Image (spheres, helix red, strand yellow):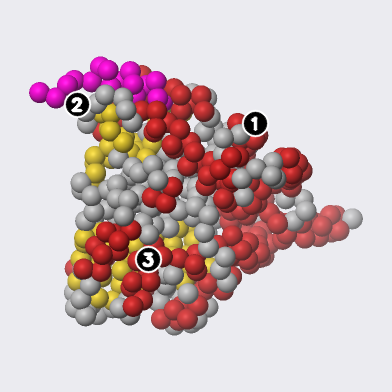
């Protein structure tokens, strides 16, 4: 009997997040199905304003009432079921680590790969599961066969870990890393595409594209940039850290050759989870960032040999995918964009207040920058937290100086009303320009 119980337990674990007994199915499936049936005739834009619908989603999170978290652009909290999955499998792992990790939970990666591929609109054989966007993109950056004199184009507004990776290759190997700069917000695709194209020379091999600029939320016209690059015979790397799980798109449709993202941002997967996508025909030529016994293999799994990893986190990713699918990617995108526009539109005309992000759908979604004349970003960030317990982040990077504010699906309208009140109150007290 004991052996039978153990067998049943193991079989159910192998199915994990995608079984009939998944935590999502137990906690949310019936309710979400009923909700979606009730709202099936509403467009995503209309549903974005339906507070009754989103209040159900909000209840799925365990965020602290002691502060209003509007720094989801850094890392997002996970829904309760994702947290419980990680805790459940962590406890199981510690009952016998080498057995449960390698013989049971390790078998759950292939179903997860398949589900992530479905969400990404990609071939499962092009998806590698890792820890964050830095690891995913650094795998490509350091894995490319570039030689001294080869040129790479990026921007000064890219994420620092990617900038420093390219600078490291330039310093060690003599590649040429060129950074162009933009004055965001920009609401003209051609201005951005042309900015990249003008930097191209016969030696250009790679263009590095940040899908959503993490500092102020500018969405770049990725498809147009990759199409332009293809005309010049140039490969493209896409940093999708802030777009995957937020914007409704399929990775191959972006037209890039390589893509990396963090899953612990808008997908709300466990902290320390990421994903790498490489077009199948390119896998063989990319060296793994960490050693592999077949580094020139065309198997995407060669990028997953990182030693002992967190299997509980991988199981949690599966529940996050279930939660995302339960809502629907387009509905989620429109809701978060609505929340961003809700607060930003209410403060844009307040004296001394400046919004640093576009209001047009094609150029912004969740992340938005704001500043108050007479205050540094650090001072505004501190004033919001000390006076109103609103957690944001001050940004000073290149030509960008503002406070970054990022809501998520669990953010309540009354919290954004408090933000608007706080910004208005702070602006009234801010010193005027001399």
- 122 on left or right of 203: right
Q: Up-down: is 100 above or below 372?
A: below
The residue mark sitting in front, 3 or 1, is: 3
- 120 on left or right of 213: right
Q: Secondary structure at mark 2?
A: loop
Q: Which residues are magenta?
A: 419-434
Q: Label 2: which residue?
A: 374
Q: Is residue 10 magenta?
A: no
Q: Label 3: which residue?
A: 224
Q: Is residue 28 visible?
A: no
Residue drawn at 33 percent across, 78 percent down = 231
Question: What is the distance, in whole Å, between disc 1 and disc 2 at their CAs?
Answer: 39 Å
Crowding around mark 3 (Cα neighbors within 10 Å: few <14, some 14 to 19, many 20+) is some
- Sequence-wise, the earlier of marks 3 and 1 is 1
Q: Looking at this view, is 107 or 190 the one in front?
A: 190
Q: Secondary structure at mark 1?
A: helix
Residue drawn at 43 percent across, 62 percent down = 260
Q: Up-down: is 146 above or below 226?
A: below
Identify the disc placed on residue 52: 1
The residue mark sitting in front, 1 or 2, is: 1
Crowding around mark 2 (Cα neighbors within 10 Å: few <14, some 14 to 19, many 20+) is some
**Image quarter in which the N terminus is found:** bottom right
Residue drawn at 81 percent across, 60 percent down = 7
């Amino acid at each position: 009997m004991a052996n039978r119980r153990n067998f049943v337990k193991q079989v159910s674990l192998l199915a994990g997040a995608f079984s009939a007994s998944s935590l999502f199915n137990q906690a949310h499936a019936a309710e979400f199905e009923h909700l979606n049936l009730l709202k099936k005739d509403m467009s995503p834009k209309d549903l974005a304003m339906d507070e009754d619908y989103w209040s159900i989603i909000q209840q799925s999170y365990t965020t602290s009432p002691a502060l209003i978290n509007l720094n989801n652009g850094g890392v997002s909290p996970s829904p309760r079921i994702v947290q419980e999955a990680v805790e459940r499998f962590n406890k199981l792992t510690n009952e016998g680590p080498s057995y449960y990790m390698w013989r049971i939970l390790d078998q759950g990666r292939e179903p997860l790969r398949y589900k992530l591929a479905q969400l990404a609109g990609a071939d499962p054989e092009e998806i590698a599961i890792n820890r964050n966007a830095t690891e995913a993109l650094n795998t490509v950056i350091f894995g490319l066969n570039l030689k001294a004199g080869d040129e790479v184009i990026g921007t000064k507004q890219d994420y620092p870990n990617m900038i420093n990776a390219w600078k490291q290759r330039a310093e060690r190997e003599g590649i040429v890393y060129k950074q162009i700069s933009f004055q965001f917000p920009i609401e003209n695709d051609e201005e951005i595409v042309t900015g990249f194209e003008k930097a191209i020379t016969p030696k250009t091999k790679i263009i590095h594209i940040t899908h959503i600029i993490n500092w102020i939320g500018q969405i770049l016209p990725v498809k147009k940039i990759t199409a332009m690059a293809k005309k010049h015979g140039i490969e493209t790397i896409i940093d999708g850290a802030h777009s995957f799980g937020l914007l409704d798109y399929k990775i191959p449709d972006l037209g890039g050759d390589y893509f990396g993202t963090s899953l612990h941002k808008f997908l709300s997967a466990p902290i320390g989870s990421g994903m790498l996508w490489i077009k199948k025909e390119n896998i063989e030529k990319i060296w793994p960032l960490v050693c592999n016994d077949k580094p020139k293999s065309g198997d995407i799994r060669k990028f997953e040999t990182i030693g002992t990893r967190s299997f509980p986190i991988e199981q949690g990713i599966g529940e996050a995918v279930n939660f995302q699918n339960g809502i629907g990617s387009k509905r989620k995108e429109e809701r978060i964009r609505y929340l961003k526009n809700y607060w930003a539109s209410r403060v844009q005309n307040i004296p001394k207040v400046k919004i640093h992000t576009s209001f047009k759908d094609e150029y912004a979604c969740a992340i938005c920058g704001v500043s108050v004349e007479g205050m540094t970003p650090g001072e505004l960030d501190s004033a919001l937290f000390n006076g109103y317990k609103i957690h944001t982040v001050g940004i000073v990077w290149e030509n960008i100086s503002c406070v970054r504010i990022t809501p998520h699906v669990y953010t309540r309208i009354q919290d954004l009303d408090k933000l608007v009140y706080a910004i208005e109150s702070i602006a009234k007290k801010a010193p005027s320009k001399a």
